[in-house]
Amino acid sequence: MLLWGSALCYLANVPKIFLNALKSNPARLAHTLMAGKLKRSNVLWFDLGAGTAVRDSEATAPGDRLSPPLSRSWSQCVPPCEQRMQRMQRMTDSLTSTLVLVEKRSQMNPLYPTCDARPISRRAFIRTSGSLAAAALWSSSSFGAVRRNPKFSAYPFQLGIASGDPTPDGVVLWTRLAPNPLIGGGLSDEPIEVFWQIAEDERMGKVIRQGKTVARPEWAHSVHVEVEGLRANRWYWYQFKAGGEVSPKGRTRTMPSNRAFPEKLRFAFASCQHFETGYFTAYEHMAREGLDLVLHLGDYIYEGAAQEKQVRRHVGAELRSLDDYRIRHAQYRTDEALQTMHAAAPWIVTWDDHEFDNNCAGDISEEAKVQPADFLRRRAGAYQAYYEHMPLRRTSIPNGPDMKLYRRISFGRLADFLVLDTRQYRTDQPCGDGNHPPCAAAYDLKATLLGHRQSEWLEQSLTNSTARWNVLAQQIMMACVDRTPGEPYAYSMDQWPGYEIERRRLLKFFRERQISNPVVLGGDIHSNWANELLTDFENLEAAPVATEFVGTSISSGGDGTQSPKSLEQLLRENPFVKFHNAERGYVQCEVSAKEWRTDYQIVEYVTRKGGPLVTRASFVVENGQPRLQKA
């Protein structure tokens, strides 16, 4: 039985889509609720259109069907169904009578309201947030009227289109309707029907898949379409339509089949694109490279307040609310170079800290006196806005302040990309953060960047991999680089050396399990690095077990420099570092069964438009030999 004392609490905490369901058809809602039990210790969310339920967990996938379709006539009910009908009628009456109370409670706090003003635990916060909205987002049904022929005040596809997370038979297509992107999107609080199609030719003459979906106001009218049934290892073109408006065309591709061994893979990775400190010229050059994939390793946006005397200017103060994060994402998405690159190839994305808050570590702020519950509320808004603007699958739908991003994406048997999250699950930075000599906390056995579950998943994925190259697509530098000339040693406590036991354990795992060609990719620090990774950096004569390529920023930090201060001494004191500079740009990689080639692509300036592209350095890694050779 549904306990109404508990039910009212939960109903006061659900998104607007649930209230719309309550208004439009309380009998239908009662039928769905009676299909399963709602317990405080085991919360389920309901897909009200399909009559399904899904356990509230980090894997938000459709669940088992609980009842026949709701279109079945209730007049067919025969004893002992009559008793059920009577209970449903009582529940319907109760739902209707409590609607006003529920609406008032929900208006107390528009983002993840709680049942009372008492402090809440992390577990309770997660349990009472997000899940019903996730169900609504991916349901094919909609409560209330859907605008099928909307009239827009301006072009609704101003934020462009994108694709991502390709598989051998499918890909995610993304867009967001926003005729006025920097003022809340510019749409009314109504769901809007959106059509999509995918074709084998750029003229869209050979359409092979098409359909329609609903852009929902609860998710900023964003659209995430998971297309399936495509042919492996080929290019496609796609487009959206809403009302009388048509989106730009995008180009995307599927991955080779899991058994295939493709001849080569060409991709680029990038990070750190501060809107205010430079233009995204790097993407203009990247779009001409004819790449198979793009990896973005974090700092897609920056959360800080608008600053004076910058190349461009942010809208608004430091980001705090869901609306703040939405506007900032929208502002970045208006960049033409970024839109062009999103439309040119599928992206694989993960975040770092600035998508939420600088140097965040789990639920711990870098600022003193910030309560974890308040920090998590802010993180919930940041994570939802991130999902709304990225071509991610439903497995990454945020659940309040939690969002699963770590995942494996394979390019046949040539390469496995193991996409990591080194922010959400980490313990606090040791030794006061920053660059410091390692203190005892840096060797804490319980300190972690990945968290227990992600770490186990990573090791299992590496063990099971049949790929020639195993690529860790993550945020921060793994090499133990002494960043201070002379004595004493100093390492970044925000990077892997701040979590030394976990770092050593992973590198030892590479060696002992004989993982095939591990390659670590990173970003974060606005500079380029090419490193050989050792299991013991105190023994500089040890043989490397992996290679690492760290990419500079797209624009963060301004124009940068080709020769950072004390470069020669840094290279001398860290002989495993084979290249370092601090210009802007991206990293391009070409991978075959025989070798991996990395080119550091440099944009000579970003504080004005038109910066030329220069290949500053190139390295080759041969199959089975984790050493860097200059190309």
Image (cartoon, grey):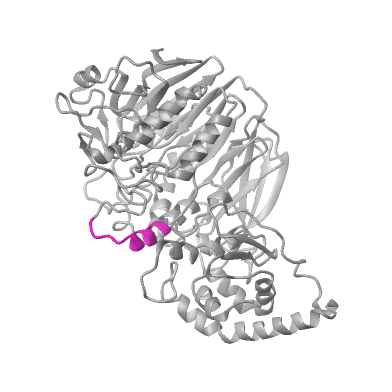
Vertical placement of 456 versus 127: above or below? Answer: above
Residue 411 lies in quadrant: top right
Q: Is residue 378 magenta?
A: yes
| Span colored in magenta | 368-380
Question: Residue 204 at what x, y percent from top left?
Answer: 67, 40
- Observer able to see residue 587: no
Decide if residue 333 is on the left or right side of residue 314. Answer: right
Question: Residue 628 at what x, y percent from top left?
Answer: 39, 16
Farthest residue to the left: give it.
487
Decide if residue 245 is on the left or right side of residue 404. Answer: right
Q: Residue at x 65, y 67 (%)?
A: 48
Label tally: 0
The foreground one among 301 and 394 is 394
Q: Residue at x 58, y 78 (%)?
A: 3
Question: Residue 65 at what x, y percent from top left?
Answer: 72, 61
The foreground one among 404 and 339 is 404
Vertical placement of 424 versus 439: above or below? Answer: below
Farthest residue to the front: give it.
445
Point out the image quarter for the N terminus.
bottom right
Point out the image quarter for the C terminus.
top left
The foreground one among 609 and 383 is 383
- Observer able to see residue 466: yes
Q: Please, what is the dominant secondary structure of the magenta stretch?
A: helix
Vertical placement of 195 versus 162: above or below? Answer: below
Question: Residue 36 at what x, y percent from top left?
Answer: 66, 69
Q: Is residue 604 magenta?
A: no
